[in-house]
Every structure is written in C-alpha cells, then in structure tokens.
Image (tube, rainbow, N blue to C red):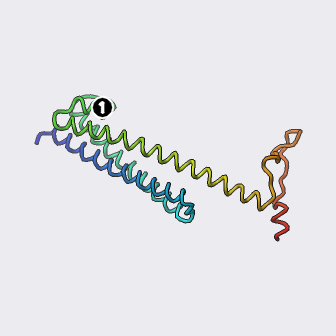
Amino acid sequence: MDADTAALEELGRRLWDERRVVTHLLYKLTVTNLLLAADERRFVPDSLREVETTVELLREGELRREDAVRDLAGRWQIEPDQLTLDELARWAPAPYDHTFADHRDAFRRLAEEVDATAQQNRELAVAEIDEVRTRIDQITGVDRSTSTTYDASGQVEAAPAIGGRLREAL
C-alpha cells in the first residue's frame, strides 16, 4: 500500500468514526426529544449531559479527521480547506471517490436530522419553560399580561418578593 492509499484509508476511517458519533448524537437528541415530549423532566438533565458528552466526542473526532485531511492535502500538495467531501468525491481515485461521496451524502442527511431534532427539542423546552413560568405566576399571583417592568419615569418597579397567593398559603 502506497502512502497516498494509506492516507485515503486513514481519512476514510476517521470519517466512519465521525459518522458513528454523529449518529449517536442524533440518537441522544432523539431520546431527549422523547423525554421532553413525555414530560419526564427528571431524566432530561441526564439526557442533556449525555448529549454534551457526545458533542465532546464529536469535537475530538473532528480534530483527528482534520489531522488526516492535512496529511492527505500535504501529499497532494494542496491546501487542507480544499479537501471538502465534494472535492474528495471528485479527486479521489476509485473506490475512494464512492466512499467519500457516500460520506458526504450521509453527513448531509445526518445534519438535517440533527438540526430538525434539536429544533424540536428547543421548541419543547421553551414550551416547558413557559408552562413552568405560568405555574409560578399562578402560585405567586403575578399577572404578566398587565405587569410592567418599568414605571412611567423609566425606573424599574420593585416587584413583591412573594405574590399574594403564596403569601396567603404561608
């Protein structure tokens, strides 16, 4: 095996590793989505920590992939930023051209799925925050539809520390 083939093999391995991590990230985001949708709040922090851990693994994988790209770019005497998956699919000899085209297509699909799932998670989390805020407002007697943050002179109004209903309950 010559040096170019070894560099192509190494880059291919790094891309496979990265695809597995991105797929695992999608899995973790989907689990978080299901927990949010099922209103299983007690498990959401653990799930989010797992997402963060997976993102860290992805960052580490990206560094290894960047090293493999730099190595191959040096062998081909081009700048590393020219070695996109589109370019690799065009320039690499067979069968690597197909391998890189497959990686390109898979990463695009995964990116779309990760973005969509993350957006759903954000929407569910915002809805959950709004629900919690509404419950707290009900307990404290705050009516956000009529309450203001500033008085007529532009000064911040002091809100009571404890709302009427909560004060009554205590």
The residue sitting at the right extreme is 153
Q: Quadrant of residue 5?
A: top left
Q: Which residue shows up at 46% across the image and 57% down it? A: 31
The x and y percentages for residue 2 are 12, 39
Seen from the viewer's position, the closer of residues 104 and 130 is: 130
The x and y percentages for residue 94 are 16, 35
Q: Is residue 159 above or below residue 4?
A: below
Q: Which residue shows up at 32% across the image and 42% down it? A: 106
The x and y percentages for residue 77 are 23, 29
> Would residue 103 appear left or right of 54 to someone viewing this image?
left
> Would residue 21 appear left or right of 130 to someone viewing this image?
left
Seen from the viewer's position, the closer of residues 10 and 89 is: 89
Q: Secondary structure at mark 1?
A: helix
The residue sitting at the front extreme is 38
Q: Amino acid at mark 1?
A: Asp
The x and y percentages for residue 143 are 80, 52
Quadrant housing the C terminus: bottom right
Q: Is residue 128 above or below residue 76?
A: below
> Would residue 129 appear left or right of 66 to someone viewing this image?
right
Q: Which residue shows up at 47% across the image and 48% down it? A: 117
Quadrant housing the N terminus: top left
Q: Residues within 10 Å of mark 1 (few under 14, many from 20)?
A: some
Q: Quadrant of residue 24?
A: bottom left
Seen from the viewer's position, the closer of residues 106 and 54 is: 106
The residue sitting at the bottom extreme is 170
> Would residue 141 appear left or right of 19 to someone viewing this image?
right
For disc 1, the marked residue is 86
